[in-house]
Amino acid sequence: MSDSKNVDKCMTRVMGIVNQIKLIGETIIDQNIVEMVLQNLLNKYDMIITTILDSKDFTNFSVEQLTASLLAHEIRLKLAYDSMEQAFKVQLSVVSPNFHFFPQ
């Protein structure tokens, strides 16, 4: 499963729960949803959480904006991981097949 599907799947589940809460007559505002999602994210999202908390006005910050920010961050993480992985592959292919790390 790709990284962006993780955010999509998570936010779909959150919105499903929010819709169930609204069906029973409770009122829930976007600010509360955003705060709950931010409190329950994994450590790999710490940088984006800090950025959102420092720069965003929660009274005008919607769930859609949060989802877009998380998706963008997750894509950046995946691109960085893929480029690092590619660099290791290139580095390993440069090593001669006759090279031994330990003398025989």
Image: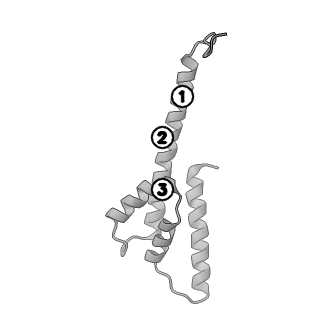
Considering the numbered disc 1 on the image, is that residue within a helix, a strand or a loop?
helix
Other-residue count near label 3 (Cα within 10 Å), few / some / many at <14 / 14–19 / ≥20: some
Dot 2 amino acid type? Ala
Q: In the image, is residue 6 above or below residue 26?
A: above
The image shows a total of numbered marks equal to 3
In space, the residues marked 2 and 1 are separated at their CA atoms by 13 Å
In space, the residues marked 3 and 2 are separated at their CA atoms by 14 Å
The residue that appears at 59% across and 56% down in the rendered structure is 6
Dot 1 amino acid type? Phe
List the residue tagged with mark 2. 80
Considering the numbered disc 2 on the image, is that residue within a helix, a strand or a loop?
helix
Considering the numbered disc 3 on the image, is that residue within a helix, a strand or a loop?
helix
The residue that appears at 57% across and 72% down in the rendered structure is 15
What's the mark number on residue 17?
none
**What percent of the width, then of the height, locates residue 47?**
42, 54
Sooner in the amino-acid sequence: mark 3 or mark 2: 3
The residue that appears at 65% across and 50% down in the rendered structure is 1
Point out the residue furthest to the front here: 103
In space, the residues marked 1 and 3 are separated at their CA atoms by 24 Å
Q: In the image, is residue 70 above or below residue 93?
A: below
Other-residue count near label 2 (Cα within 10 Å), few / some / many at <14 / 14–19 / ≥20: few
Sooner in the amino-acid sequence: mark 2 or mark 1: 2
List the residue tagged with mark 1. 88
Dot 3 amino acid type? Tyr
**What percent of the width, then of the height, locates residue 81?**
52, 40
| Residue 94 sits in quarter | top right
Q: In the image, is residue 91 above or below residue 82?
A: above
What's the mark number on residue 45?
3
Observer-nearest residue: 4 or 81? 81
